[in-house]
Image: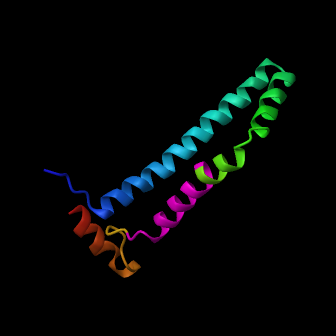
Amino acid sequence: MAIKFSKTFLLRKLHQITGIVPLGIYFLVHMYTNSTAMSGEKVFEDHVTDIHHLPYLLFIEVFGIFLPLLFHSVYGIQRPSPEMPISPSTLFRANLRFHG
């Protein structure tokens, strides 16, 4: 018996992952590189130079950071939210219906 996932479920999970993973990895690498500055200017410069000389840096930046965050942004903006009221005049009724 196969488990069926809805398209919406998979898109929302992909939306979550493409927001958390690229930013989390970027943050950890950034914090590690910046923390090497406590060991001296030379060590920090060496780490930054090593990163800039990676032969696949552009690939990582485009496919590991830019495209996932672009998907995350576009899907997050276009995804309709059922709990958002359509107009300010329906704000109170929508809140009662959602939270009541």
Q: Viewed as shown, does residue 29 lie left or right of 34?
A: left
Residue in the foreground of this view, choosing between 87 and 65: 65
Q: Is residue 23 left or right of residue 57?
A: left
Magenta span contains residue 72: yes
Magenta stretch: helix, strand or loop mostly: helix
Q: Which residues are magenta?
A: 64-80
Does 96 appear above or below 14? below
Q: Quadrant of residue 12?
A: bottom left
Q: Is residue 75 left or right of residue 80?
A: right
Where residue 93 appears, x then y in whole percent? 27, 74
Q: Nearer the viewer, residue 67 or 24?
A: 67
The quarter of the picture where residue 27 lies is top right
Looking at this rendering, what residue extends furthest in the top direction? 39
Placement of 15 over or under 47, stated as above or below:
below
Residue shown at 82%/27% (left/top)?
A: 46
For this view, does 27 lie left or right of residue 33? left
Residue, x 39% and y 80% (percent of image)? 87
Q: Could you tell me residue 9's position as x and y percent? A: 31, 58
Q: Nearer the viewer, residue 56 or 13?
A: 56
Q: Residue at x 77, y 29 (%)?
A: 47
Whether 39 is among the magenta residues is no
